[in-house]
Image: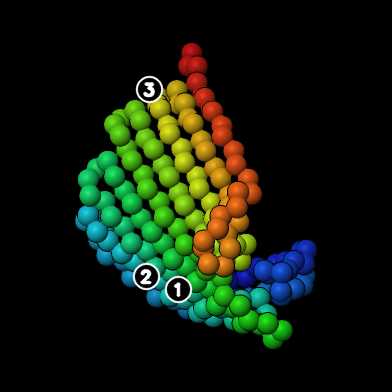
Amino acid sequence: KFFERIDNSFTLVNKVDIPVGDYHFNRYGFYYRTDHSRPYSAYAYLETGDYFHGKRDDLNIGLWFNPNKHVAINSEYRIKKMRFAQDKFDTKTMRLNINLAINAFWAWTNKFQYDNVSDRAGIFSRIKFEPQAGEVYQLVLSRAFEVDDEFSRFKTQQQQLAIKGVYTYRF
């Protein structure tokens, strides 16, 4: 059982208005995951029930590949089927994460994501160097693309490159 109080109305996916009020949700689900310590693992999550003044069904599927202690790759697909009196629609999200722990000091994290609501894809890549505790340097690249319906054209919407550094002085 879930409860949510909405103080300011909002619109879901530019289609369904959620007015101010108190909402009680009854949701039921099933979760299954294989042993994550193995080189290959997977999970599936199903949930159904109330969602504001409508209904929502969720399906999440994930796969992991961890060939060794330095490489972790996982993918995820999420679909949410929402049904309201005035409209129904699906939201879909696809993710791919590729993480490399090069050694105790260097790591490279990469995240790729697409969702059908915004028709945008995103890339996030971070190279992290941590020579000692309290000292971290990062090079971060993020980029967002607008995607056409056939996935044949990607138009850059936003891109950012940042250099970050943190040093903790202990006394």
Q: Which residue is at 30% across, 34% downward? A: 102
- The residue carrying pointer 1 sits among few (fewer than 14), some (14 to 19) or many (20 or more) residues within 10 Å by Cα, namely some
What is the distance, in whole Å, between disc 1 and disc 3 at their CAs? 41 Å
* Residue under numbered circle 3: 131
Q: Residue 134 placed where, x, y %?
A: 44, 24
Numbered badge on residue 44: 2
What is the distance, in whole Å, between disc 3 and disc 2 at their CAs? 38 Å
Where is 42 relative to 29, above or below? above
Q: Are marks 1 and 2 in contact (CB under 8 Å)?
A: yes
Q: Which residue is at 54% across, 80% downward? A: 49
Where is 35 relative to 80, above or below? above
The image quadrant of residue 143 is: top right
> Circle 2 sits in a helix, a strand or a loop, which is it?
strand
Image position of 152 (left or right of 19): left
Q: Residue 20 placed where, x, y %?
A: 77, 70
> Which amino acid type corresponds to the residue marked 3 in the rendered image?
Pro
Q: Is residue 46 in view from this perspective?
A: yes
Q: Is 79 in front, or is 142?
A: 142
- The residue carrying pointer 3 sits among few (fewer than 14), some (14 to 19) or many (20 or more) residues within 10 Å by Cα, namely few
